[in-house]
Image: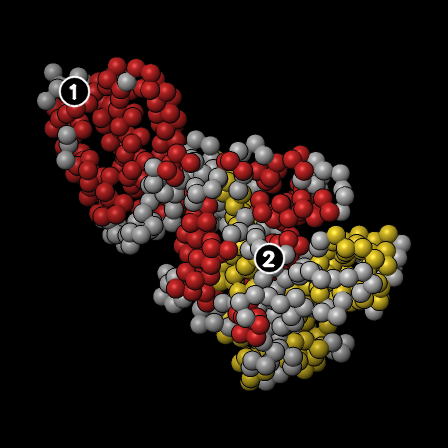
């Protein structure tokens, strides 16, 4: 344990001498309050430390004690349903002991050391054990079975002793290896170090979200990365709420990184009330929340995303599919910029540090579908919100993020102002996963690829025609071009727009998504043929079945598989009768 002395204070950045024997990223406790910090630069015996707590009142000459270990996350039963700050302090427990505000230097364990958990052994003495071996199980919540794993940094050995089934706390050993190492139900892991795995696997299936514009047009693969950029009020947080509730991940980690307090309060109050559609119980039983609002210390905001992804990797190693919602990476980048400025580093674009792309890459590359050390197949999917000032997608955080993600859901202010939800632009967004997950979708519905391509092409044509309409009006266009505008409007209202408060429309199963879009595109093909026969568009618009097609998204239940084919059967005779009257 190295003991030094504070010689300079610059906001959350502190310099201390006498810490030459410490390592980079070691944890340091400073002053009488033992404020938590981390060494981010070493020059001989002088360490530069970023402090994760409010250091108002700190004086030169105070003690700085290096704990000679990196900033680590405590992993074990009790994580699910908990609300942490950026350095894994439980906020509910802090409120009970210290009130509504976090007192500097407060020390509360991340996991309850007194709580007993029922441990069921899964191995026997004499069996081999190594990193990732499942020693036993604990029913962490009603919906999640936690697997007690041998820590990844443990040497390969054999089981010398295993605890019998019973109640234990996280400080009691539940197994002993032949080399004498004791295994507890919980262990520590450095937040900035990725947990190891055997190999990365190809991403060949989607993360189903139930949002039609995402699943059909811009899908994200299970284990993939996506960004949701958009200006203030365009719906980034609401979209992430919907993804957290409806996506088919087993575990949700929601990181509120530098967001306004009122937005984070809404998350903290609404998530416990949300009902998990899988189990009918509270969504919090498979969710971890990390709340690091804009009025909390800026250094803790910088580390919060590493805390979140380490928690996700822990559950991934058990074989679970995990989804991370990071809101927002722009606030995290602003924290980097502030700390970089106090370190007097040379700034790059718009004052951000030159290593911003590297840090973004380090975060997003921890996503992926992998084979774990224990032989499981699991994944981490990361969805990061980006808040470009003024909605300018050319700013550095958005541009650098696009280098490391493969799914881009651009939010459009005009759509948001028109109350079109989700406000994801079908012109500016893209997904590079579509080709990889195509075989999965074609097993669900073989028409997925063809109907998706034809619909996107039609929407692009509609955008070009809209520019002409603004100049000369729609009446100057021929009927076949006006039909493009008509069909595009049906796609927007009957497919892309989704009502988050409608019990039927808030979530849409994959097969229903494709069937609705195919119904609209079949109408377009038939209507185009009828126009070629000489029928006016006005007659086609008057068909009663069109209103039923647009309302199908909220009228047809997800389980009612026969309703949409019946609607398609109704469309055929109506259009055939109209076509017959114009045939010669």
Given contact means CB atoms under 8 Å apart, are the residues at marks 2 and 1 in contact? no
358 left or right, relative to 280: right
> In the image, 504: left or right of 271?
left
- Residue 549 drawn above or below residue 524: below
- Mark 1 residue crowding within 10 angstroms, few (<14) / some (14–19) / many (20+): some
- Residue at 56% x, 65% y is 101
Which residue has dot 2 on it? 296
Q: Earlier in the sequence, mark 2 or mark 1?
A: 2
Q: Bin the neighbour count of mark 2 within 10 Å (Cα to Cα): few under 14, some 14-19, many 20 and up.
A: many
Left or right position of 418 against 121: left
Q: Residue at x 23, y 17 (%)?
A: 475
- Specify whether residue 450 is in view: no
Q: How is the image coloured?
A: secondary structure
Q: Which residue is mark 1?
A: 535
Height in image: 284 above or below 304? Answer: below
Q: Choose mark 2 or mark 1, whichever is in front.
A: 2
> Relative to residue 498, is residue 175 depicted above or below?
below
The quarter of the picture where residue 290 lies is bottom right
Of residues 197 and 352, which is closer to you in this image?
Answer: 352
**Place of residue 238 in the rendered image (x, y in percent of width and height, measured from the top left):** 42, 49
Find residue 109 and name its label: none
Residue 457 appears in the picture as rendered? yes
Specify the farthest residue to the left.
581
Please state the horizontal and vertical placement of residue 150, each as a whole percent of the image.
66, 70
Q: Nearer the viewer, residue 56 or 526?
A: 56
Residue closer to the observer: 406 or 510? 406
């Amino acid at each position: 344990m190295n003991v030094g002395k504070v010689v300079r204070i610059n906001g959350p950045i502190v310099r201390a001498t006498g810490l030459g024997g410490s390592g980079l990223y070691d944890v340091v406790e400073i002053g009488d309050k033992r404020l938590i910090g981390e060494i981010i630069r070493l020059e001989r015996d002088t360490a530069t430390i970023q402090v994760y707590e409010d250091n108002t009142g700190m004086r030169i000459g105070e003690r700085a004690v290096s704990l000679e270990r990196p900033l680590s996350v405590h992993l074990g039963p009790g994580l699910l349903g908990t609300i942490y700050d950026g350095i894994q302090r439980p906020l509910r427990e802090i409120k009970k002991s210290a009130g509504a505000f976090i007192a500097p230097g407060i020390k509360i364990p991340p996991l309850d050391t007194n709580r007993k958990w029922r441990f069921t052994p899964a191995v026997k003495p004499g069996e081999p054990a190594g990193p990732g071996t499942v020693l036993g199980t604990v029913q962490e919540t009603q919906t999640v079975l936690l697997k007690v794993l041998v820590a990844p940094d443990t040497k390969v050995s054999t089981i010398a002793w295993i605890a019998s089934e019973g109640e234990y706390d996280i400080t009691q050993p539940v197994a002993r290896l032949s080399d004498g190492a004791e295994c507890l139900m919980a262990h520590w892991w450095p937040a900035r170090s990725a947990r190891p795995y055997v190999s990365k696997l190809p991403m060949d299936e989607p993360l189903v979200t139930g949002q039609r514009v995402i699943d059909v047009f811009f899908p994200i693969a299970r284990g993939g990365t996506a960004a949701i950029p958009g200006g203030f009020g365009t719906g980034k947080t609401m979209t992430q709420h919907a993804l957290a509730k409806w996506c088919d991940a087993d575990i949700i980690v929601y990181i509120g990184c530098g967001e306004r307090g009122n937005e984070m309060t809404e998350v903290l109050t609404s998530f416990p009330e949300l009902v998990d559609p899988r189990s009918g119980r509270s969504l919090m039983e498979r969710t971890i929340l990390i709340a690091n609002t804009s009025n909390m210390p800026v250094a803790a905001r910088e580390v919060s995303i590493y805390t979140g992804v380490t928690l996700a990797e822990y559950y991934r190693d058990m074989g679970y599919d995990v989804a991370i919602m990071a809101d927002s990476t722009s606030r995290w980048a602003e924290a980097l910029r502030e700390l970089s400025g106090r370190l007097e580093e040379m700034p790059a674009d718009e004052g951000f540090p030159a290593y911003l792309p590297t840090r973004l890459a380090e975060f997003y590359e921890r996503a992926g579908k992998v084979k774990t050390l224990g032989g499981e197949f699991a994944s981490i999917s990361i969805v990061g919100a980006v808040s470009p000032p003024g909605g300018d997608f050319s700013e550095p955080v958005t541009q650098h993020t696009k280098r490391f993600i493969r799914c881009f859901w651009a939010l459009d202010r005009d759509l948001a102002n028109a109350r079109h939800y989700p406000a994801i632009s079908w012109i500016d967004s893209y997904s590079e996963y579509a080709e990889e997950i195509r075989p999965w979708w074609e097993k669900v519905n073989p028409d997925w690829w063809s109907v998706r391509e034809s619909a996107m092409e039609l929407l692009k044509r509609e955008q070009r025609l809209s520019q002409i309409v603004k100049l000369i009006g729609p009446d100057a266009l021929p009927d076949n071009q006006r039909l493009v505008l008509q069909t595009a409007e049906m796609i927007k209202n009957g497919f892309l727009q989704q009502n988050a408060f409608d019990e039927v429309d808030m979530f849409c199963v994959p097969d229903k998504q494709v069937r609705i879009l195919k119904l609209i595109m079949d109408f377009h093909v038939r209507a185009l043929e009828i126009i070629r026969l000489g029928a006016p568009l006005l007659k086609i618009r008057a068909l009663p079945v069109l209103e039923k097609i647009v309302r199908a998204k909220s009228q047809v239940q997800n389980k009612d598989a026969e309703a949409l084919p019946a609607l398609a059967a109704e469309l055929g005779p109506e259009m055939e009768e109209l076509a017959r009257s114009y045939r010669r």
